[in-house]
Image (cartoon, grey):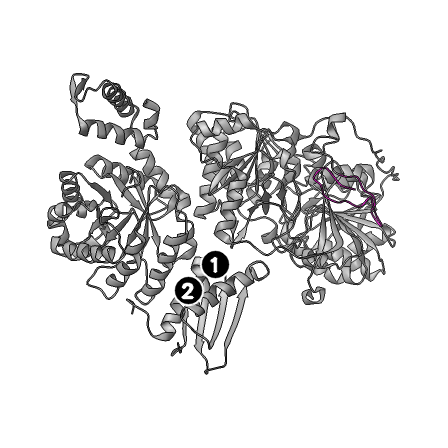
């Protein structure tokens, strides 16, 4: 269940690093990813799993969404990850290297089986599918629409360029098509699309450029590997004054009309129905404006 | 007798004298004058064309008639690179002098070598702003019979003026000096910048020796120490290890945690009423404190706000802000890196100041009285905002009072930055082990898990809540921290007092008790 | 349960704890040595977190060394559990 609408920033935290895990929630990232996959050495998968499991039980991550990136099911580690993590019901589970809807089906089946064993419902924890291969990019629409539990698609730029056998460049030219295809699949299914990390943590200007481009083409957020990347990204994803003004107008009208029992109405000559109201809510929450203040 | 924080303070300590109990941060100041009598500076006399130059430090010391029980003083501008203090003590010991009272403005890890001289009775009393390393541990374990006195920078000036610290011999290291004793730290191979802590020693000591490794042609400029106070001058090969005296430029921390805390602190400052045209500003020398300057600088540029003066404790970051025109002047009592020394030399508005002008509460208005915003660190802070900067989590002396209580007392907005816990040890807790800076002078605590505002500033809290900052109740934060770390076993101390913590007005705000350590293990 | 292998888990990094485990002869008991910068304040807490794990896996005989760098309890428990499972040969999903 998304705790909030925002996923502007997603902070990667290596799952075998206690110092970073215990501090994960203090940086104000909208979303935190506890990583059992690429950030953990192959012979430390058990150590990381147990550590992340314990951290999920005891550490307060404050208002951030908590996501855990497990290993794929076709590795020796994936099943054990799910068995340890699913019962704890983090906000979401991220599946790396998702390539087909069939893969996703197997995964969801495994998850739901574990949930059943623990008397948990199937509607709380969501799934983020990570696209990191050419095959995944081609199949992304099927993946995105496969299940209501999938509420975000993310792109893994490093692995994707490796799979495509091209160099990874700062301007992201090689993965541009992949990014846009992923975004389209996400939009068609009304779910979030999260961009890949910008690896040069010392290049502030480069990060801002990359994040601005990501926003322009439709990504709803971006992964970060160092906390200092969070603020610039939040700045870029903050709605403009004009957007806030319009959203305020719509939401005010919505509240007024709802009180008077009117379901459909117009603002500035345009019809306002549920999706328009939701978009206004989204913008207001991104601007940290309390919806209650309109009552 | 109990002081106003409820601490038990002895009325008298053998070897120190009568003690006065702390009664509040500004209680004595509210009278508008000081009760104690001040001692006049010594009256000296000198024939014309007297040769002050001595061939060695030993010769100069002998000329000053050292005696058992004398008080010697030093400044700590050489920081971790100081050789001079230990060499002086070695010489005095060689001359058979005992029961020395050591009054260095502070002591660093460069002074671990003093241990044998504490053990054998060469040094029996210490006044200092701070004590680190093995020296701090040894004193905590009880190596001295007389408790040490921990004072603030401003408080040291007061103590010298009242004769609480009565200096017989001041040894002043200088990176450049002339044959008459005019001296400075602003240039030379061992340059250290401002010599602010030593000025009062030069005015009040019975005898003053200037020691330099760089004798320049008369006159030495700038004459930070003036010739009419100096009795003897000595040239030696090296006053200290230049590498440990002043680094190139002080780099801003890259630790994500410190940066996060700094960012939050800067947000609190820039959203307060004190962030306005003409504000004055001081930051601590490193870690999260210094990083706050970086974020405030950004916001000043964004909002086109120009400040008035910077104070401290000066690093190259502040010099950059001066040169960018963000502030009009820097008042420098201690310089931390090489870039700062050249700024003192070349920039008229980079002004060297003595410790009394900096922070002594007993004059017509020290610089800390004019301060708007200060950012300080802490070893511990309690739910009453009292701060410990002197003893560590094991109860041993390891830090310094420094300008902490001085600046907190004067600044309109005192911001303390620290992590909520470090290495599993809680920093925000119910009671600190030793109080150095009283909570009533502290306004905001900034940790990575939330910002706490002193309840004595309710409008400030409202302002910050309105700005959308993560404001927490400090007692709640302390509980939250304890839940994360677990409850540490309390420190076990003995009844014996090994140190007294003097507040800037001369009253005693807390005492330091002996810990259960083995002195011999330090040798 | 009887331990089989010498094993370790954790690291020397700040906020972590390195736990080294060796099987011991039956009936020799638990030989636990803990080294920590915060021994005075948290020594007992560290020992308890470790023995809780030993109790859970019913380990009566063991030689265990712990080098702690200020780890929180969830970390101490995690590293102890990992080391024990590795020593028992029952660790899951790893190479």
Where's the N terminus of chain B, which quadrant? top right
Q: Which of B127 and B97 is in front in this view?
A: B127
- What is the number of the mark on residue C71? 1
Is residue B300 shown in magenta? no
The crowd level at tag 2 (other Cα within 10 Å; few <14, some 14-19, many 20+) is many
Which chain hosts label 1?
C
Q: Can residue B218 be seen in this view?
A: no
**Residue at the disc numbered 2:** C79
Which quadrant holds residue A205? top left
Q: Give the range drawn in magenta.
A: B1-21
- Residue B240's label in the rendered image is none
Element carrying mark 1: loop
Characterize the magenta stretch by its predominant secondary structure.
loop
Query: What residue appears at the point 43 percent right and 62 percent down from the top-left corner?
Result: C77
Residue closest to the eye, A21 or A255: A255
Question: Where residue A38 sits: x, y (%)?
Answer: 28, 58
Q: In the displayed structure, would residue B442 be above or below residue A85?
A: above
Which chain letter goes with mark 2? C
């Amino acid at each position: 269940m998304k705790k909030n609408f925002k996923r502007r920033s997603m902070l990667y935290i290596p799952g075998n690093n206690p110092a970073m895990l215990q501090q994960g929630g203090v940086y104000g990232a909208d979303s935190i990813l506890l990583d059992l996959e690429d950030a953990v050495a192959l012979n430390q998968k058990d150590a990381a799993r147990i550590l992340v499991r314990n951290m999920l039980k005891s550490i307060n991550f404050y208002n951030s969404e908590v996501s855990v990136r497990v290993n794929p099911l076709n590795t020796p580690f994936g099943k054990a990850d799910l068995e340890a993590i699913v019962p704890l019901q983090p906000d979401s589970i991220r599946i790396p290297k998702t390539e087909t809807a069939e893969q996703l089906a197997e995964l969801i089946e495994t998850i739901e089986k574990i949930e059943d064993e623990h008397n948990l419902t199937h509607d709380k924890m969501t799934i983020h599918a990570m696209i990191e291969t050419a095959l995944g990019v081609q199949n992304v629409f099927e993946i995105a629409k496969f299940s209501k539990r999938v509420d975000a698609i993310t792109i893994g730029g490093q692995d994707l360029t490796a799979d495509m056998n091209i160099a990874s460049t700062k301007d992201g030219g090689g993965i541009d098509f992949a990014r846009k295809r992923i975004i389209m699949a996400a939009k068609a299914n009304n779910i979030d699309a999260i961009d890949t990390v910008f690896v040069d943590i010392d290049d502030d200007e480069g990060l801002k450029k990359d994040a601005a481009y990501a926003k322009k083409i439709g990504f709803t957020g971006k992964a970060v590997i160092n906390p200092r990347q969070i603020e610039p990204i939040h700045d870029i994803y903050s709605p403009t004054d004009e957007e806030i003004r319009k959203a305020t107008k719509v939401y005010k009208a919505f509240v007024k009309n709802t009180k008077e029992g009117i379901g459909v109405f117009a603002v500035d000559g345009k019809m306002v129905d549920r999706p328009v109201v939701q978009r206004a809510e989204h913008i207001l929450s991104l601007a940290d404006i309390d919806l209650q203040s309109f009552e | 007798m109990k002081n106003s924080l409820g601490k038990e303070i002895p009325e008298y300590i053998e070897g120190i004298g009568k003690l006065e109990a702390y009664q509040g941060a500004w209680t004595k100041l509210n009278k508008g004058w000081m009760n104690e009598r001040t001692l006049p500076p010594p009256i000296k006399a000198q024939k014309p064309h007297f040769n002050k130059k001595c061939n060695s430090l030993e010769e100069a010391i002998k000329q000053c008639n050292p005696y058992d029980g004398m008080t010697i003083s030093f400044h700590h501008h050489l920081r971790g690179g100081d050789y001079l203090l230990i060499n002086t003590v070695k010489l005095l010991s060689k001359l058979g002098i005992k029961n020395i009272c050591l009054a260095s403005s502070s002591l660093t890890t460069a002074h671990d070598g003093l241990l044998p001289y504490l053990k054998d009775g060469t040094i029996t009393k210490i006044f200092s702003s701070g004590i680190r390393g093995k020296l701090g541990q040894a004193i905590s374990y009880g190596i001295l019979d007389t408790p040490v006195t921990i004072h603030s920078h401003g408080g040291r000036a007061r103590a010298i003026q009242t004769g609480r610290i009565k200096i017989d011999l001041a040894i002043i290291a200088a990176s450049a000096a002339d044959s008459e004793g005019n001296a400075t730290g602003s240039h030379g191979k061992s340059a250290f910048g401002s010599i602010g802590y030593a000025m009062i020693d030069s005015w009040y000591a019975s005898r003053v020796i200037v020691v330099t490794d760089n004798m320049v042609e008369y006159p030495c400029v700038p004459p930070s120490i003036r010739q009419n106070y100096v009795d003897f001058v000595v040239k030696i090969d090296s006053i200290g290890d230049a590498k440990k005296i002043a680094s190139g430029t002080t780099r801003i921390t890259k630790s994500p945690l410190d940066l996060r805390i700094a960012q939050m602190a800067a947000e609190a400052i820039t959203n307060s009423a004190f962030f306005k045209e003409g504000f004055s500003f001081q930051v601590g020398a490193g870690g999260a404190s210094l990083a706050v300057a970086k974020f405030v600088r950004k916001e000043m540029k964004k909002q086109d706000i120009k400040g008035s003066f910077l104070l401290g404790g000066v690093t190259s970051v502040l010099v950059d802000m001066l040169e960018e025109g963000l502030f009009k002047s820097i008042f420098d009592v201690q310089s931390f890196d090489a870039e700062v020394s050249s700024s003192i030399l070349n920039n008229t508005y980079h002004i060297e100041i003595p410790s009394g002008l900096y922070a002594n509460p007993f004059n017509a208005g020290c610089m800390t009285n004019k301060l708007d915003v200060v950012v300080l660190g802490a070893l511990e802070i309690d739910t009453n905002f009292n701060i410990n900067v002197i003893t560590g989590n094991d109860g041993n002396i390891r830090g310094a009072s420094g300008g902490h209580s001085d600046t907190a007392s004067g600044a309109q907005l005192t911001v303390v930055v620290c992590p909520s816990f470090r290495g599993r040890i809680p920093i925000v807790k119910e009671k600190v082990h030793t109080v150095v800076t009283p909570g009533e002078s502290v306004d905001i605590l900034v940790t990575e898990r939330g910002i706490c505002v002193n309840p004595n500033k309710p409008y400030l809290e409202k302002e910050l809540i309105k700005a959308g900052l993560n404001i927490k109740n400090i007692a709640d934060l302390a509980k939250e921290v304890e839940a994360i770390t677990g409850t540490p076993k309390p420190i076990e101390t003995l009844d014996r007092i090994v140190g007294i913590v003097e507040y800037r007005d001369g009253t005693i705000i807390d005492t330091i008790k002996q810990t259960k350590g083995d002195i011999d293990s330090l040798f | 349960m009887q331990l089989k292998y010498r094993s370790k888990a954790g690291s020397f990094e700040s906020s972590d704890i390195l736990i080294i485990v060796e099987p011991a002869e039956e009936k020799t008991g638990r030989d636990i040595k803990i080294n920590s910068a915060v021994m005075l304040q948290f020594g007992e807490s560290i020992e308890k977190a470790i023995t809780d794990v030993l109790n859970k896996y019913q380990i009566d005989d063991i030689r265990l060394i712990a080098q702690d760098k200020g780890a929180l309890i969830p970390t101490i428990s995690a590293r102890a559990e990992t080391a024990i499972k590795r020593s028992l040969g029952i660790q899951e999903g790893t190479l």
